[in-house]
Each structure stands twice: as structure tokens, then as C-alpha cells.
Image (cartoon, rainbow, N blue to C red):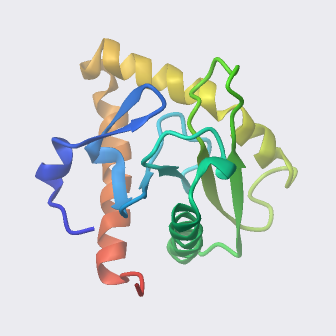
Amino acid sequence: MKSSLSALSQTFRTYGTMRIPGELIFYQKPTVYAIVPFGMKLKQHIMVIPHRKVLGLKDLSNDEIAEYGLTVKFLSTMLENLYEGTSSTVFMQNYFPTDQRINHMVTHIVSRKKGDLEKNDMIYGLLKTHDKGFVEEYNAYLENPESMKEKMDELSQMAQVYRKFLAEHPDSD
């Protein structure tokens, strides 16, 4: 991504009904973007989100699916390299039209190492309930941005680390 950080701070992307601050966005393609999320469960946790608001994978076009899949592959490799992971958990979250949550498909990627959690499968429960923490931190940010300054600085710094890594290791397309 060739945007300057100052340009990013003026940029927002929509995730469900929420506007994601540009400082948290570290990767963009024509149909997909990636962020350091509010309410993240582990330091090495990112989210990949289609630009177009869809409930699930079946709602994406074949071209969107191709770009989405390649992005997930590329960014999971990035995380494994950065955090010396041995694998990644890739958790795609689809929604139903009646869900009262975010209602925007997302894929969580978490770089993993043996023994990083007490029980390996705990990661699925953490990611399945991520919506709640994300919405709570996002709402706190909206209500009182100054109270979330430290958290936003932390998330923005992580996004900057990812941007720098990606500038040094661009994807091949």
C-alpha cells in the first residue's frame, strides 16, 4: 500500500455500520482491506474485510473471492514471518440476515506457535466472540476518543509495523 500515514488518518473504511479509522488499515486491494482490530484477542491478530458489505463468502463474486483468498494467504504468511509463527488460524466469520451484530463478513488471522494457548482450540471461542469486544472498544473510541488515545496509539503503531514490513516484502502481484 503506497498511502502516506497522514493520508490514512483521513481515510475510513466501513465494517458493518462502523467507520474504521485509517490508522488501523495497513493493507488494501481493490476489493479487500486488512486492519489491526479493536478488541483484538492476541497481539498477532488481524482482520481481513471485503470492501463490499456482504454477509458471507457466497455473496462475493468469483473475482472478489480470488483476491480475498490471495490476501488471506499473503497476510497469514506475513504474520508468521513477523511473529516467528509455525502456523496460522484462519477463521472466517459469516453472518445471517437476522444477526444483530456487525453483519459484515470478516476473516480473522492469528499467527500461532505451539503452546501459545493453554488449549489449542481455545482460539475458536476467542474469535467467535470477538464482535463484542470490537464493538465495545469501537463505541468507547467514538464516545471519548481521548480516553482511547493510548489504545489507538498502540493499534496504530502495530499497523505501522505491518505497513513497513509489507513495504519491504511486497506481494508478488
Q: Nearer the viewer, residue 107 or 54?
A: 54
Q: How many marks?
A: 0
The correct choice, above or below, for 74 with respect to 12 in the image is: below
Residue lying at 15% horizontally and 41% vertically, measured from the top left: 10
In the image as oriented, which residue stretches furthest toward the bottom?
172
Q: Quadrant of the C terminus?
A: bottom left
Please give left or right for residue 98 compared with residue 20 in the image. Answer: right
Residue lying at 67% horizontally and 25% vertically, measured from the top left: 97
In the image as oriented, which residue stretches furthest toward the front?
61
Please provide percent x and percent y for residue 147: 31, 19
Please provide percent x and percent y for residue 170: 36, 82
Q: Quadrant of residue 30?
A: bottom left
Please provide percent x and percent y for residue 118: 84, 50
The correct choice, above or below, for 32 with respect to 126 in the image is: below
The correct choice, above or below, for 89 with respect to 25 in the image is: below
The correct choice, above or below, for 133 with respect to 154 in the image is: above
Q: Nearer the viewer, residue 70 or 64?
A: 64
In the image as oriented, which residue stretches furthest toward the top?
143
Please give left or right for residue 17 compared with residue 7 in the image. Answer: right
Q: Quadrant of residue 3?
A: bottom left
Q: Nearer the viewer, residue 79 or 55?
A: 55
Please give left or right for residue 6 compared with residue 102 in the image. Answer: left
Q: Quadrant of residue 167?
A: bottom left
Q: Quadrant of the N terminus?
A: bottom left
